[in-house]
Image (cartoon, rainbow, N blue to C red):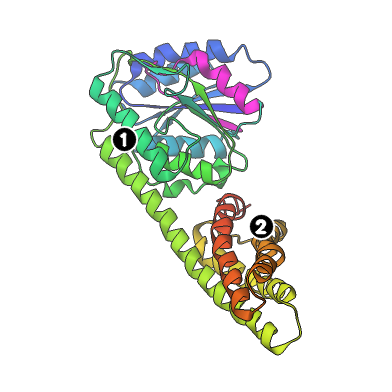
């Protein structure tokens, strides 16, 4: 695999001169993978870029990428991600700092987890074995812990403990290369939360590994003063977007419901079909109506645009959609009719209850499997 380690810098001449040899020393022991170090420098006045060019003469796999101007941590990483994919054919992209807050000795652990099947490896300070330096101020620790708890509950991602770590490895094919990097919500520190959220929604397999986050050796901190507010804004905006998607989905569900219940009752009153068959047929028609509306409206930012993708996911869509239809048709409606009374009113009440349960079922599985942000290939 081609593994590109992206390191953003600004006034880190001494740090970069020290950390690059350490990274080379660790990675050259892995003979099965091809490593490169990509330093993204924001035109540092202290000569960081010149130091990287000196290192590249000694280490051919060290590269310098100069930003047009210093634009923030997130912008630097996104710039590096694009270059790593488009110019360096990266299979894996690793994010890390230049200031030794991230230990180069942990790199093999990240690569090993990717080789074991993970798509997104997170260096976590908040799982067993992970830690934050005891020299961190108490207020910063409290903000970090509290911010991660807030992100976990607001975004509903409960299998992640560290949302703001800067030490991560991402699989490119099928994941990073499918993300719209031009629309990451923050050019600063909070890009991490948005990228993690997008990877999660893409269906990536997550793995957290413990790291010790240390005090920086020297150089200027890349932390902006507005980090906390920026992170809060990104988390709330992501949740709002999810809510907006669900509200649209609910509207489409209501349209599907009207189609479903109208056709269901038409078959009951105008044909000799049984309640079971009428429910199945009306459900099938409603599935097709809602698929079109969901693809081009509810999940418009993740819509399927290519026929091969639609044909690939359509069978799974029908299978997921048919589960609640089967449940209401074969189990719920017959049970209600047997338990209470064999009437059209009872059949309709059971039918509507089945639709309500199906709404929740469908949204969860559509979001995670059908419209998961990985639909443009």
Q: Nearer the viewer, residue 91 or 277?
A: 277
Q: How many dots with numbers?
A: 2
Q: Is residue 31 magenta?
A: no
Q: Nearer the viewer, residue 273 or 333?
A: 333
Q: Position of residue 259 (x, y in %)?
A: 59, 78
- Residue occupying image coordinates x 69% and y 69%: 338
Asked whether the viewer can see residue 104, the reply is yes
Which mark is drawn over residue 26?
none
SS of the residue at dot 2?
Answer: helix
For mark 1, what is the residue?
70
- Residue occupying image coordinates x 67% and y 71%: 337
SS of the residue at dot 1?
Answer: loop
Q: Are marks 1 and 2 in contact (CB under 8 Å)?
A: no
User: In 3D space, how far apart are the residues under numbered discs 1 and 2 (Cα atoms)?
Assistant: 47 Å
Number of residues whose C-alpha sits closer than 10 Å to that of mark 2, classed few (under 14), some (14–19) or many (20 or more):
some
- Residue occupying image coordinates x 65% and y 22%: 33
- Magenta part of the chain: 91-115
Residue 74, compared with residue 312, is above or below; it is above
Q: Position of residue 177 (x, y in %)?
A: 57, 43
Q: Nearer the viewer, residue 112 or 210?
A: 210
Asked whether the viewer can see residue 60, the reply is no
- Residue occupying image coordinates x 61% and y 28%: 114
Taking the image as shown, residue 188 lies to the left or right of residue 25, namely left
Q: Nearer the viewer, mark 1 or mark 2?
A: 2
Of the 4 image quadrants, the one containing the N terminus is top right
Q: Quadrant of residue 302?
A: bottom right
Q: Is residue 112 magenta?
A: yes
Residue at the far front: name it: 340
Taking the image as shown, residue 84 lies to the left or right of residue 189, namely right
For mark 2, what is the residue?
320
Number of residues whose C-alpha sits closer than 10 Å to that of mark 1, classed few (under 14), some (14–19) or many (20 or more):
some
């Amino acid at each position: 695999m081609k593994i590109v380690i992206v390191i953003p810098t600004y006034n880190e001449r001494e740090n970069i001169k020290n950390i690059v040899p350490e990274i080379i020393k660790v990675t050259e022991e892995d003979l099965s993978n091809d490593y490169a170090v990509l330093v993204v420098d924001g035109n540092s006045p202290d000569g960081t870029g010149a130091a990287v060019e000196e290192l590249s003469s000694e280490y051919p796999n060290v590269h310098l990428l100069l930003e047009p101007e210093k634009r923030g941590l997130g912008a630097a990483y996104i710039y590096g991600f694009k270059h790593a994919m488009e110019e360096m054919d990266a299979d894996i992209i690793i994010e890390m700092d230049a200031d030794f807050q991230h230990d180069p000795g942990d790199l093999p652990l990240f690569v090993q987890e990717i080789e074991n099947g993970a798509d997104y490896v997170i260096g976590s300070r908040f799982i067993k074995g992970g830690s934050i330096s005891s020299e961190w101020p108490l207020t910063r620790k409290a903000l970090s812990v509290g911010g991660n708890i807030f992100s976990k509950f607001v975004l509903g991602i409960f299998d992640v403990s560290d949302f703001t770590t800067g030490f991560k490895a991402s699989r490119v094919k099928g994941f990073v290369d499918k993300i719209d990097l031009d629309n990451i919500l923050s050019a600063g520190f909070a890009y991490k939360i948005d990228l993690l959220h997008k990877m999660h929604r893409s269906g990536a397999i997550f793995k957290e590994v413990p790291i010790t986050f240390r005090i920086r050796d020297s150089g200027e901190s890349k932390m902006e003063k507005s980090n906390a507010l920026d992170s809060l804004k990104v988390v709330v905006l992501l949740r709002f977007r999810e809510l907006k998607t669900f509200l649209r989905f609910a509207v489409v569900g209501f349209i599907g419901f009207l189609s479903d219940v109208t056709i269901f009752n038409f078959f009951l009153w105008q044909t000799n079909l049984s309640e079971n068959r009428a429910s199945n047929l009306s459900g099938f028609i409603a599935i097709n109506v809602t698929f079109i509306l969901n693809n081009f409206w509810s999940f418009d930012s993740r819509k399927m645009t290519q026929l091969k993708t639609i044909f690939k996911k359509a069978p799974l869509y029908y299978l997921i959609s048919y589960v609640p239809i089967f449940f209401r048709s074969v189990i719920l409606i017959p049970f209600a009719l047997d338990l209470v009374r064999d009437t059209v009113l009872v059949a309709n009440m059971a039918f509507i209850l089945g639709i309500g349960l199906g709404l929740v079922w469908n949204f969860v599985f559509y979001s995670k499997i059908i419209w998961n942000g990985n639909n443009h290939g």
